[in-house]
Image (cartoon, helix red, strand yellow):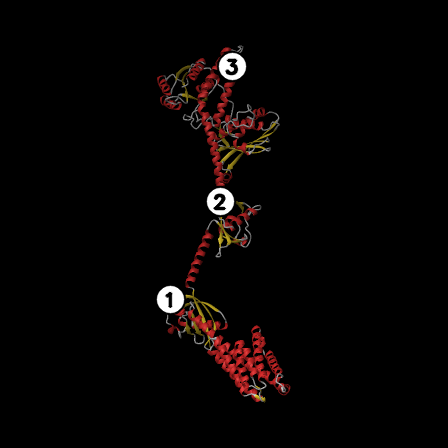
């Protein structure tokens, strides 16, 4: 029995070899392989039954159970379905009492093999040694059980062959199954190797990336794919066998070092320069690793041409360097933020604008957002992250030192390669100086508008002053004469007094208008402002009343100013009266003087100021103060906060005009409920002040002198002639300038004084005087004027040695002026 089993095992080994051959032969034709394998298993089973163990006539035992279980296990249902009928047919052909049990054994062995086939597909552990041994035991235990179907001798058969079958047949099944498994593994490995080589060859040949196979020991190229041939430019036959040093610019030692590293690594990378057939050099990325080809340990090399990428990267680096230099050189702040508002970049312009250095802010939140601006900044960042671009948004932020920085901000989102917003870039221009200049310009525009408005009113006032003063001259002159002629006891004396008072008030109003419009003629002298103020203190105390305290603080060693004393007194009087009206319940008026020097820095903060040396006159009250709107209009003529009938609105306008006419400056500071300070800046001069004394009034009675009177206004002319003749003077009269020159030429020897109106037809008073002096240089002259733009006082400052009689003037003023000039 053992020898028969060995024979069957030999047949099964032959079966394994045959299956391997069939596997190679029909690898691509699976159906043919299964049919051929089924036939081979069936044939081996038949051959085994030809040399069986003969137990009795018609009762045989062989290795068909092993063959068919292997057919089911390794061939599956198709092979088993072919092999089993072949074996069953032959066993049926042999016949005998054991035919039916024999066929049953064939069926159960094939069926159990197929069952194990499917179990193996689920879990490969079913074909490990122990499960296979147990499976062999099950197959042959069933086989022994089927022997009981043989009539009469079944139990005897089981008793006699059972132990041997259960020992040797499972072992034989395990042995043959292991042989089949090894054959199967080798066939699969060889198949995988063939597929791998085919895949490698396909990948190598058809790859668009240049590939080389390199012998690392000989440092030569073993093979090159078509892409490498196209890249390098040499024929494939020439590339194969070429030393690597022929294409690599590195030395052989460095090449060998690189290949040694590639042997140790599954993925070696290097950036190199390779030489092409035309001699040009290309930048390449080389990726290499070990590969086994034809039993040899070689290296593969993937070659990527990165020359254009290197060039593009260099261009990008140059552009980035250019942009960095441009950003760093920009005077504007260029700031980069991430989507969370953290600073990514900060140029030197940002350091200049805000004061923080780059190291102070990068990686931190934006530092220049002032407290209270967080929500506004967050909203702006939200708009930008939504895709909006911010352009020239003016805002006020803070610098490192805490000072405000007025800026113009433009910002835009930075979009990444995937289309999402990755950061924010902002350009910030410091416009603090521009805004300051705009504010100063706006202030200057307001001042210019105010000046033009005042100029217009002044021109209007000056335009009517001349004619109006002539009329007042006639009214007041005739009024004085009527008063003198009628005597004190007449009933008309009271009416005449009212008329003269009204004329005087009208004359005062005209003088105020002329002062405001800077057309009042000034008698300029070098004076000490302390002396002027001290002299008028008693008068000021009478004006302001006892309920208000008045304090004078004279500056030490006060500089001299060139001014009209009478007009300076008028300025102080107007300011004190204004202060008095602001303190109906009483208070304090403080008058101060001091020397000041205004420099450029002061002017930068006070655009109205002019640099230079000044004497400062300050008048401060503790009254109700003014709001900003009132303060901006305080110097406007006819502007008043008093009730109707309680002021003309010309007091402070007169102050403004007189100060400007003195080439000075006036500034007012006031707060509601805290009082007001007026500051008058008068230009200082280096000369010493003259002594101010009482005016000596000369005699007003004429001594028979001859006076030439030239006046274009007939009523004024007749009045002047009447007054002079009544005082004992001889008078020659004329109504225009040319006639005046002619009359003087005719009577030059007898004329002692000429009284000339500044504005006359044909020739003005000054032109007449120039021609008269050419005839007789020592002649004395008095000019009379209500207002003249183009005459001797075109700048409205009386020149040295020129005598002026301001219209309207009274009878006594006229006679006193004539007498004083004649007596000089």
Q: Secondary structure at mark 2?
A: loop
How far is the residue under mark 3 from the one under mark 2? 68 Å
* Residue receiving disc 2: 431
Residue 517 coordinates in the image, percent (x, y): 47, 28
Q: Secondary structure at mark 1?
A: loop
Circle on res. 553: none
- In the rendered structure, which disc, 3 or 2, sits on the residue that comes first in sequence? 2
> Is residue 250 something one can see in this rendering?
no
Give the mark toward the camera: 1 or 3.
1
Which residue is pictured at 43% across the width and 57% down the height? 318
Q: Secondary structure at mark 3?
A: helix
* Residue receiving disc 3: 496
Dot 3: few (<14), some (14–19), or many (≥20) neighbours within 10 Å?
Answer: some
Q: Is residue 306 left or right of residue 672?
A: left
Give the mark toward the camera: 3 or 2.
2
- In the rendered structure, which disc, 2 or 1, sits on the residue that comes first in sequence? 1
Circle on res. 280: 1
Q: How many marks?
A: 3
Residue 501 coordinates in the image, percent (x, y): 52, 18
Dot 2: few (<14), some (14–19), or many (≥20) neighbours within 10 Å?
Answer: some
Dot 1: few (<14), some (14–19), or many (≥20) neighbours within 10 Å?
Answer: few
Q: Quadrant of the C terminus?
A: top left
Closer-to-camera residue (4/745): 4
Residue 346 coordinates in the image, percent (x, y): 51, 52
Residue 750 coordinates in the image, percent (x, y): 38, 16
Q: Please determine whether, in this image, residue 332 is positioned above or below residue 676.
A: below
Give the mark toward the camera: 2 or 1.
1
> Is residue 751 something one can see in this rendering?
yes
């Amino acid at each position: 029995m053992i020898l028969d089993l060995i024979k069957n095992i030999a047949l099964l080994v032959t079966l394994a070899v045959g299956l391997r051959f069939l596997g190679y032969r029909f690898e691509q034709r699976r159906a043919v392989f299964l049919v051929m394998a089924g036939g081979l298993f069936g044939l081996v089973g038949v051959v085994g039954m030809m040399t069986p163990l003969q137990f009795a006539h018609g009762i045989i035992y062989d290795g068909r159970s092993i063959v068919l279980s292997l057919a089911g296990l390794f061939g599956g249902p198709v092979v088993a379905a072919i092999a089993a009928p072949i074996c069953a047919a032959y066993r049926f052909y042999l016949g005998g009492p054991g035919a039916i049990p024999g066929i049953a054994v064939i069926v159960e062995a094939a069926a159990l093999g197929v069952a194990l086939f499917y179990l193996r597909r689920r879990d490969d552990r079913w074909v490990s040694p122990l499960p296979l041994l147990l499976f062999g035991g099950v197959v042959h235990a069933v086989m022994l059980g089927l022997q009981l179907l043989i009539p009469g001798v079944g139990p005897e058969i089981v008793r006699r062959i059972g132990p041997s079958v259960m020992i040797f047949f499972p072992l034989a099944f395990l042995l043959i199954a292991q042989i089949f498994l090894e054959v199967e593994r080798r066939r699969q490995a060889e198949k995988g190797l063939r597929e791998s080589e085919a895949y490698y060859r396909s990948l190598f040949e058809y790859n668009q990336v240049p590939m080389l196979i390199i012998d690392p020991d000989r440092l030569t190229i073993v093979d090159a794919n078509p892409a490498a041939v196209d890249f390098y430019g040499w024929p494939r036959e020439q590339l194969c066998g070429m030393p690597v040093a022929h294409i690599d610019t590195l030395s052989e030692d460095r090449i060998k070092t690189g290949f040694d590293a590639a042997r140790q690594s599954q993925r070696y990378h290097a950036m190199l320069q390779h030489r092409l057939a035309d001699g040009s050099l290309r930048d390449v990325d080389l990726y290499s690793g070990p590969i086994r080809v034809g039993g040899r340990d070689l290296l593969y090399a993937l070659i990527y041409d990165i020359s254009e990428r290197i060039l593009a990267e260099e261009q990008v680096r140059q552009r980035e360097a250019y942009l960095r230099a441009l950003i760093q050189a920009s005077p504007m702040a260029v700031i980069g933020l991430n989507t969370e508002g953290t600073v990514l970049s900060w140029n030197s312009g940002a350091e200049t604008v805000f004061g923080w250095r780059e190291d102070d802010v990068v990686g931190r939140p934006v530092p220049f957002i002032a407290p209270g601006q967080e929500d506004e900044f967050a909203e702006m960042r939200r708009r930008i992250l939504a895709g909006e671009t911010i352009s020239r948004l003016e805002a006020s932020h803070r610098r490192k030192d805490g000072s405000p920085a007025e800026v113009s901000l433009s910002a835009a989102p930075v979009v990444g390669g995937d289309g999402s917003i990755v950061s924010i870039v902002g350009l910030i221009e410091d416009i603090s100086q521009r805004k300051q200049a705009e504010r100063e310009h706006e202030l200057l525009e307001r001042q210019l508008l105010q000046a033009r408005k005042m100029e217009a009113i002044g021109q209007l006032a000056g335009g009517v002053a001349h004619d109006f003063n002539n009329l007042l001259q006639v009214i007041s002159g005739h009024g004085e004469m009527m008063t003198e002629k009628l005597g004190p006891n007449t009933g008309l004396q009271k009416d005449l007094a009212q008329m003269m008072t009204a004329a005087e008030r009208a004359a005062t109003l005209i003088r105020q208008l002329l002062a405001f419009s800077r057309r009042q003629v000034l008698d300029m002298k070098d004076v000490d402002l302390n002396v002027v103020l001290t002299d008028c203190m008693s008068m000021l105390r009478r004006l302001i009343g006892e309920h208000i305290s008045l304090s004078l603080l004279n500056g030490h060693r006060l500089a001299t100013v060139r001014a009209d004393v009478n007009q300076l007194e008028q300025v102080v009087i107007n300011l004190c009266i204004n202060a008095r009206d602001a303190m109906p319940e009483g208070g304090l008026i403080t008058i101060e003087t001091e020397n000041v020097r205004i420099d450029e820095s002061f002017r930068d903060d006070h655009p109205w100021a002019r640099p230079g040396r000044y004497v400062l006159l300050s008048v401060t009250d503790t009254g109700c103060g003014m709001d900003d709107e009132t303060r901006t209009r305080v110097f406007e003529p006819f502007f008043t906060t008093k009730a109707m009938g309680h002021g003309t609105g010309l007091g402070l306008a007169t102050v403004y005009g007189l100060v400007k006419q003195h080439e000075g400056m006036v500034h007012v500071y006031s707060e509601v409920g805290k009082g007001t300070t007026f500051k008058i800046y008068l230009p200082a001069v280096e000369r010493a002040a003259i002594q101010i004394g009482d005016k000596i009034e000369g005699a007003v009675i004429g001594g028979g002198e001859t006076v030439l009177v030239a006046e274009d206004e007939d009523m004024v002319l007749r009045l002047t002639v009447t007054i002079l003749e009544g005082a004992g003077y001889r008078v020659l009269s004329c109504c225009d300038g040319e006639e005046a020159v002619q009359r003087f030429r005719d009577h030059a020897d007898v004329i002692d004084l000429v009284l000339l109106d500044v504005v006359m037809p044909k020739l003005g008073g000054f032109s007449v005087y120039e021609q008269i002096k050419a005839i007789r240089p020592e002649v004395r002259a008095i000019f009379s004027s209500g207002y003249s733009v183009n005459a001797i006082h075109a700048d409205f400052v009386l020149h040295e040695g020129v005598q002026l009689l301001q219209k309207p003037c009274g009878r006594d003023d006229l006679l006193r002026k004539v007498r004083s000039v004649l007596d000089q």
